[in-house]
Image (cartoon, rainbow, N blue to C red):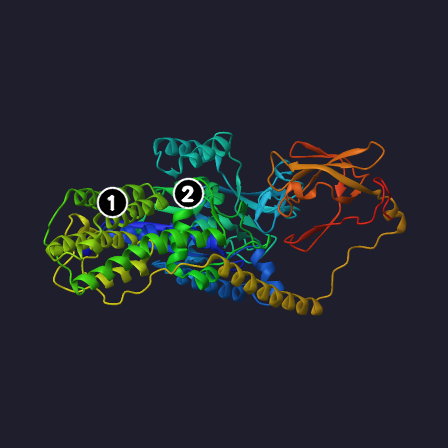
Amino acid sequence: MCEQCKKPYYITTAIAYTSGKPHIGNTYEIVLTDAIARYKRAQGYDVFFQTGTDEHGIKIEEKAREAGVTPKQFVDEVAQTIKANFDLMNTSYDYFVRTTDEYHEKQVQKIFKKLYEQGDIYKSTYEGLYCTPCESFWTESQLVDGKCPDCGREVKKASEEAYFFKMQKYADRLIRHIEEHPEFIQPESRKNEMLNNFLKPGLQDLCVSRTSFTWGVPVDFDDKHVVYVWIDALSNYITSLGFDADGHHGERYLKYWPADVHIIGKDILRFHTIYWPIMLMALNEPLPKQVFGHPWLLVGDGKMSKSKGNAIYAEELVHYFGVDAVRYFVLHEMPFAQDGVITWDLIVERINSDLANILGNLVSRTLSMVNKYQGGEIRYPKVMEAVDEELIALVLATPKRVAGKMEELRIGDAIDEIFTLLRRSNKYIDETQPWVLGKDETKRDRLATVLYHLLESIRFAAVLLESFMPNSAQTILDELGTQKRDLSSLNQFGELECDHKVCEKPQILFARIDTEAFQKQLESDHAKMMTQEAKKEAKLKETQPQETKEEISFADFAKLDLRIGTILSCEKHPKADRLLVEQIDLGNGDVRQIVSGIAAHYEPQELVGRRVVVVANLKSTKLRGIESQGMILCAANEDDSQLDLITITKAMANGTQVS
């Protein structure tokens, strides 16, 4: 297809927040988007694939202050780290936008002013509970255990002058758009959530400026204010294309907007399917065609988090397994609508079963047999038998099946279709037994036919795998010695060129991993790393004096009634994943029900029988609908990534006072 005839296709990731290094759960998004972008290019689309970084806000300002650098210096360094992470994973983005880019900042100011002048933005005062890490305001009823419902950290009361966006003005129009365009929000369950939980109950006006920090895009007509995250961050999708709020749009904007799909995490779906479309409506610009809210990649059964200490990073995975194995795992293991799971054991299992046994073994066996029986030469005399027709039918059906899954953004299912073909090809070897044919001189043409069918099946699979595992796919096609590498070459069976030789010594694509040896190596490496981190932390603490709280009198301390109690039972809170509900015996028939925010650190069964210290005279309260009649004491580090219950080891009666 000529370049001028190609249909444009614009795809984006959410822009990564520059608060620190992304873990594999964050990195998954750009690998997913890259797979879609590569496949669309292979189909003949003129793809523009954008990613980038979100670089403003109070959290950045505070982190820069802690690091002793300017906010710009801080984000420059982190943006480079994020970009290097994306490059490590062999992602083929066309543009990396930063919200500190000069053109972006100027357009944000113009967008803000335009919305203000046309009456969509007004000035008022905001009062609420603010979570700095999430940069979100919450009401008292939305808090969990008095803390942010998203990240579990402390919130602070905030009251400040701010500008607000009139969300409700466009709500009915957005509801109609979503209902008339069922493909707009995917998966389907996400659409229902946005309609029923946010839009139909009624939208509150959105806070779009702040005065409590300065690291942001200044409101050019009111210099006390900086533009708050949503207008700044979300508008990157159009400013990077050359959108101009005055209407003098660049060529790229006119060519690629509206976006074909925004790929984002499910946790920011509200911003992209409510705030962003309403902003575009107010600007009188077309809405993106689709927003896909992908699920999370969990560690075991918990959300990956740096503060929990359970984050796994791309560079560590690549160090052990290589780029394509990591790409395969995260793309294949993530379901369409439910959260996926990553563990070290599961990665090793998938590499051994899928990549080494099914893919690598098929390529290795086939090329070895072509070299052994035919001197490496590819021949196709077409001596056919009934068993061949089934294989050929599947080979020809696979590209169509992959195309159907990719159209629905079911990436893991698309990969499954390719591996169904690979499994069938391995079975074909067992059915045709080339090693037996090789012993019979009269079966030479039949053997050549069987080997050609295997080589052509591998070619089909490799061309289809290029979007997901680009380096491995190219290696396989190189070893076949073929120039037929495009999706268009998969329309008929038999395109693999004959009368040339395959690679004489094919490389091992994916070696089997000894599970036990790998586990020992991993434990050893992690122990060394933890030792190094502990030394760094200790050295840092030597130069930073510990903060102490305000002094209290003995009379203040004497007000606390601390007692020893035994945990009789413990179960998970039915409405809050981070809470546990314990029944604790304080002696003399006093059994207390206490709700604790420690589920990230303890399984319920671990706590039964533990003898703990209870604040017995703490005022009773309800946490997510369940009464809590006290508090158990524990020690925790600053970010709650480590926590340990205060326990009693000597035989002392329940109810004994602690003083």
Image quadrant in which you'd find residue 373: bottom left
| 117 w.r.t. 314: above or below | above
Q: Position of residue 655 (x, y in %)?
A: 84, 39
Out of 105 and 557, give the one closest to the viewer.
557
Quick check: marks 2 and 1 in contact, CB under 8 Å? no
Say which element carries label 1.
Answer: helix
Q: Amino acid at mark 1?
A: Thr
Q: Which of 245 and 298 lies nearest the eye of the viewer?
A: 298
Q: Which residue is mark 2?
A: 335
Marks 2, 1: nearer the viewer? 1
Q: Residue at x 49, y 48 (%)?
A: 230
Relative side of 286 to 446, left or right = right
Q: Write down the quadrant of residue 143 in the picture.
A: top right
Spot occupied by residue 224 in the image (x, y as percentages of width and height)? 58, 54
Query: Where in the figure is residue 206, as x and y percent of width and height?
Result: 52, 41
Query: Looking at the rendered structure, which numbered label has been put on residue 232?
Result: none
Q: Tell me how far mark 2 sits from mark 1, CA to CA.
A: 20 Å
Does the image show residue 165? yes
SS at badge 2: loop
- Left or right of 555 in this view: 14: left
Q: Nearer the viewer, residue 527 or 387?
A: 387
- Percent from the top left, x then y, of residue 526? 56, 62
- 106 to 284, vertically: above or below: below
Q: Is residue 514 left or right of residue 421?
A: right
The residue lying at 71 percent from left, 40 percent from top is 608
User: Alpha-carbon neighbours of circle 2 within 10 Å: few (<14), some, or many (≥20)?
Assistant: some
Query: Amino acid type of disc 2?
Result: Pro
Seen from this angle, which residue lies furthest right?
555
Q: Nearer the viewer, residue 170 or 415?
A: 415
Q: Which residue is mark 1?
A: 398
